[in-house]
Image (tube, coloured by chain):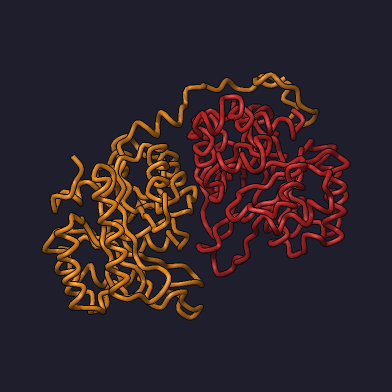
Chain colours: A orange, B red
Amino acid sequence: MSAAGFMVGAGINTFESKAQPVSSSYDIMREVMKYRKIDAHAHINFSPGDVDKQLDFADRLGIEKLSISRPITGNVGTHEEVIKHNDLIIKAIKSHPDRFIGFFTLIPTFAKESLEEIKRCVDSGMSGYKGYLQVKVNDPSYYPVIEKLIDHKMICFMHAYSGIGRGGYRTKYGNLYPNESTPEDFIDISTRYPQAIFQWAHLGAGGDWEYQCKALKDYPNIYADTSGSNNAGNLIDYALKYFGEDRLLFGSDLSYYQSVSKILAANLNESQRKKIFFDNYNNLLRKGGYNVA
Amino acid sequence: MLLDINAHVGHWPFKQLKNNSCATLLERMNKFDVEMSVVSNLNGVFYKDTQAANEELFEEIRSDKRFKTRFIPFAVINPIYAGWQNDLERCDKEMDMKGICLYPLYHDYEILDPACVELIKSARDRGLIVTFSHRIVDSRQRSWMDISKEWSMTDIMPIIKEVPDAKYFVVNAANSIMLSDEDTEILKKTNMLFDTSGRNISNLGEMIKRYGKDKFAFGTHSPILDYLGGLLRIESLRENEADELTKQLLRSENAKRLLGL
């Protein structure tokens, strides 16, 4: 008979003796709700009801605020699409100012239009920038955009990837997307603009996070969000070793359960959890006055 | 109580794993109040002779009396490698393993290979559970020496249709578990469980509605995935999605039913 009171078969796992006592003190939902959280990598889309759906996940997991963006993901993109996507975010932050922090998107090759769009988005209450893979983050077309972000003390948050054999640095195997920003691209631009704040997107998006952590270790103005569907067992502990406890930002990228569980399961102390779930990101937002009270 | 139907010990050749021994897994179990774990040896994915991995697991569990009551060992069997019938006999009768893990993508055979069908029928006749995984690791972060293919539920359905009266665990459901209405009905009649570790268990409340509350069980896919994702999916269900009795089914009772505990 096992400790749980059920009989099992014979052999090595006969369970004939009492199992070691197990405490029943771990309450995961109590742990989940114990920490204030800002999701540094969230999205909404154009589907009816999507805002409510994302907020429902956030409520379920005690996520207080979500930094939302809607980059153009399906094609090369036009500036008209940029405006449409940013309008979606403006509408959301105005309807839910207590829950959403808005990040605008751009295609920097539309140079003049992009600078005008930054002004429009800042005036509309946006708090930062989210770029996708139309242009690499270190492309010269980004320079005026990043200089504006520096002026506004805003985060330059970029989609990013590196994976052996798929995209990024092992080009002999072929890139998934030619303009996807790699660690080396981030290093290049962060060195050019040491006063800028860069957010490496989704360590858990499936790329080679070990490579990413090692590559970005020595660049203090590059922060990494921990979002993505991959909640590899040692990801957070490994990232902590390279980024340190002040440069990791909690994020979901719509993978809500993994985003929270990977932090809770990691070998972090209370202070580190608070920093990653909330304080680190809020401190970055605070530089421009976009922080949560 | 919590019973994890999807844990591993052993090594992954392309990346260092943590908490990948019985001793360290037991520490995780104690920390998070998991009473028992189904455990298999990842080394069996890569050994040509998978029985060596099963022997390793057997010896490791036998090495510490605490392990006997906490671990439920599953064997890794490759049905296209010589001697699997003898290996299965020993794993079942001498090592008292309660199920088998099959890795057709890694061991390079089709799921309807006659040898695989024969193995599963033999497992069925012995009352052993058959485990398939959508993937072991995320192929996006794979080594250049690793495989790139992953499975979804449609890849596993052919063998379930072929041997519908076997017992199955489908673990780390990283990809789609959506099926046609016809296959959904077949699956609902099958004695099987999805574990809750996979990323595609993204809305467990809706999935329970579709497949039934008897079709899911707590799993970690430890140490490949973080230890708590599968638990969080269960415990964050609201009352209107899963009442306390349903949560008990998910935490341990469904697993106990299939394991015959």
Q: Position of residue A114 (x, y in %)?
A: 21, 73
Quadrant position of residue B49: bottom right
Q: Nearer the viewer, residue B126 or A289?
A: A289
Q: Is residue B161 above or below residue A35?
A: below
Number of callouts in the render? 0
Q: Left of A69 or right of it: where is B123?
A: right
- As displayed, is residue B73 above or below residue A45? above
Left or right: residue B189 compared with residue A234: right
Q: Which quarter of the picture shows residue B217?
A: top right
Drawn side of residue A9 relative to residue B65, left or right:
right
Q: Residue furthest left?
A: A151
Question: Which residue sits at x=25%, y=47%?
Answer: A280
At 47% across and 60% down in the image, what residue appears?
A206
Which residue is at a point 69% across and 18% down the rendered structure image?
A5
Could you say which is closer to the camera, residue A197 or residue A65?
Answer: A65
Residue A233 visible in image: yes
Point out the residue furthest to the front here: A48
**Where residue A128 sits: x, y (%)?**
22, 58
Residue B51 in the image: state x and y as whole percent: 77, 50
**Which quarter of the rendered picture does the C terminus of chain A lie within?**
top left
Q: Quadrant of the N terminus of chain A?
A: top right
Q: Is residue B54 visible?
A: no
Residue B206 horizontal/vertical position (percent): 57, 42
